[in-house]
Image (tube, grey):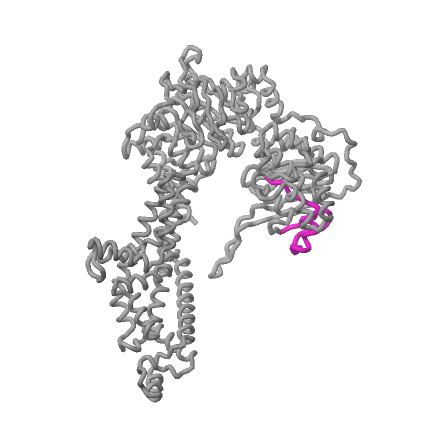
Amino acid sequence: MSASPETVSPVLSVRGLSVDARTPTGLKRILSDISFDLKGGETLCLAGESGSGKSVTSLSIMGLYPKASLKIAKGEISLLGRPITALPERQMRAIRGGDIAMVFQEPMTSLNPVMTIGAQLTEAIREHRREEGASAEHLARQMLDAVHITDAARRLTQYPHELSGGMRQRVMIAMALSCRPRVLIADEPTTALDVTVQAQILTLMRELRSEFNTSILLITHDMGVVAEMADRVAIMQNGRIVEQGDVLDIFERPGEAYTRDLLAAVPRLGALAGTEQPPRVSKTEPFIRTDSEPVLAVSGLSVSYGAKSGWFGAKQKAAPVVDGVSLAIKPGETLGLVGESGSGKSTTGKAVLGLVPFSGSVKLDGREIGGLSQSAMRPLRRAAQMIFQDPYASLDPRMSVGAAIAEPLVIHGIGNRSEREDRVAALLRRVGMDAEAASRYPHEFSGGQRQRICIARALALEPKLIVADESVAALDVSVRARVLDLMLELQEQMGLAYLFISHDMAVIEKMSHHVAVMRGGRIVEIGTRRQVFENPKDDYTRGLMAAVPIPDPAHYRRA
Amino acid sequence: MAQILLRRLIQSALILLGVAAITFLLLYALPADPARMIAGRSATAQTVANIRHELGLDQPLVLQFLYYLGGLLQGDLGRSYAQKTEVWTLIAARLPATLTLMAAGILVEVLLGMTLGTIAALNRGRAVDRLVMMSAFVGVSAPQFVVALLLLYVFAATLGWFPMSGYGTLSHVVLPALTLGLLGAGWYARMVRSSMIDVLNQDYVRTARAKGLSGARIVFRHALPNAVLPVIAMIGIDIGQFMGGVVVVEAVYGWPGIGQLAWQAIQQVDVPIIMGVTLTSALAIILGNLIADLVAPIVDPRIRSH
């Protein structure tokens, strides 16, 4: 950022870019009239919700969009003043990975599993910098050092599966920067990573931007990441840029209604400081807890996977995934279970529903479920239901919405056909959908609507406890906010207890009465929301909270 | 590793025992009498009975089987009823021919299948893809003896490029290997195509493209090694399928291998030879699977570390 951006001509310039999709009914415009400039050493964020056209824009710049289904209708993309839209493949290849490099969202799958890290790194170097053998390897080692991977020489001989997600993303960044590109396109580079790892990667990218004098086009849905990283931001919606400008201006004085909505929907950590309860969303009388008995009482819960005995008696005892967890949830209350991947939070959620074998005690609605047979467990299952992360995968595509919601009723033999139909209609209305949705199929609905359907299905048996495992993680922020409000409303009206599992601190803060922080299978801190969020006792909890990007660019400018 | 090998060894021994028992039972259940076959039609009942006694066929089945197993443990496969020679000597003499044929057949099926499958995947949805998939379908469906006759008619009888039958030179191998490999080639073409399409949609292929690599490098260095992983496991299983084909192909082309030996033995109800060939085939399948399991970790580092 040494040269002032205003005086430098843009490194990358996009003018009036429109992209059509080939559909059975003809061409359909999915990107219209996209224009922006990326100046030297600058970070521009393309921000927007899913389907807004962020990724199509970046793939169009790289010439990597699927040519069978998409077509650039008009517009110009130029790199250092040279148009690249119509370049032949051969010349485009020199640009790809050479002048413009890209980092993708999924570090777990973006590296080739059967090639060593070294082979994948040196490949790009050999292709673009014409370095051979030892000198290419030397460069590769330097790049790993630059992204702070220790023991670089050994890493070069390792395979991707031997590295953690954060480490793989560092390798991806090293690979992208190894040919000193003018532009680095990063498409949701930290979305799949834990929040503490995300913070490290974002810091690394800022550091490398000045070190390598690379401009960054950062694509993200996360306004916190935008605030932390961007010099300028372009807000995208439905294939258009609705607003662009300096990040401080946009966050302080959003000009468009959509931008305002988007910013308003972002949960902010600390927004509820000083209050005991989650925000009230309905006007009903608060649900009164007549019984103080907890719906769920867990003590000393442990789960280990993969304990097996070999043929020759060599018993292998696996390390516990969940280790001595104790917690309790009362009716009408939410316990937020927060932690990073591998902390054992999902396994805990499954164990309390009796979905994985465990040791310790789990009392559901006053009854111990440990050691119950499948058939003895069945009536108890009515008391507790689960909502999963992926609303696309958790509904059977060949089952109508009505049938999916009615299925738990059928399994438990409740009501006759017409009674069940009435019940389904009532449930759909309850989650804010039309009753006629019952006859339609999951693919006709958006992600948020599908999650509502999943909630309706979970409510069908009138459970007392709902285990929500990352239930809003796959949803866009604005949709996420509405689904969270729906869950709060249902809780207020029906006195539901939630075990709300999430990696997202802000979401946990919004939803919870009590919070438990998990790490390595253990609860490191548990208490009321105010205790945990306003006065965290554990270093790990403090680290987690410090790592959450704050959706306020001014915060980072001050720093 | 040593533990895994030991476990596999015990498993293999159990499989061979099972194969021996089942084959023995099946042969016993056959409505043909080996003693009568050896004695000939005009022989008296007494001659037949003598022969039966000589071969030990008048003993109870369990005893016969135990005797056989006893021999087997000492590496003795018994003597042929008809030829009076050691079964092992007969098989050993013919094994090289069959192994050559099988190696050539596997080469044909893998090379042809992988090439066609890759071409189809890269041209997905186009005419080339449909043509390849259609040929693959024909290859899978055509009975081997028909393929054999067709190849013989075109390349041996009409064009005269290859000899009609026999064994010894490279040109003798071509037609039998093609006949043997075409069926599997169709299989593999379909499998490699779908596996390749899957791999080409993977994130790491997109990464490779984003690096600016050439199309050839992406296909051969990045996609193909991943796409062949399921095929390697398949080859091991496939050897069983192959043995059936070997009998037909050796018979049609007069190839002096153990398939032909088995064919003659079946006609003469020569039980020791049938048993010997069956056990040899079973051993080949077990070894094939073992080799596939040993090769897989070399190609796939994720298996190596487990």
- Residue range of the region highlighted in magenta in the rendering: A359-388
Report if residue B143 lies within the magenta region. no
**Rendered view: B163 above or below A321:** below
- Residue at horizontal 41 percent and vertical 58 percent from the top: B4
Q: Position of residue A81 (x, y in %)?
A: 37, 16
Report if residue A380 lies within the magenta region. yes
User: Which corner quadrant of the image does residue B155 belong to?
Assistant: bottom left
Give the left or right position of residue B152, taking residue A179 as reference: left
Give the left or right position of residue A315, taking residue A152 as reference: right
Looking at the rendered structure, the number of numbered marks drawn on it comes to 0
**Rendered view: B181 above or below A485:** below
Q: Position of residue A334 (x, y in %)?
A: 69, 37
Q: Position of residue A21 (x, y in %)?
A: 47, 29
**Rendered view: A3 above or below A380:** above
User: Which corner quadrant of the image does residue A120 belong to?
Assistant: top left
User: What is the quadrant of the N terminus of chain A in the image?
Assistant: top left
Q: Position of residue A94 (x, y in %)?
A: 33, 26
Give the left or right position of residue A426, taking residue A267 as reference: right
Give the left or right position of residue A172, taking residue A434 as reference: left
Specify whether residue A528 is in view. no
Q: Foreground: B162 or A66?
A: B162
Q: Foreground: A1 or A299?
A: A1
* Residue, far right: A290
- Residue at horizontal 37 percent and vertical 56 percent from the top: B236
* Residue, far front: B158
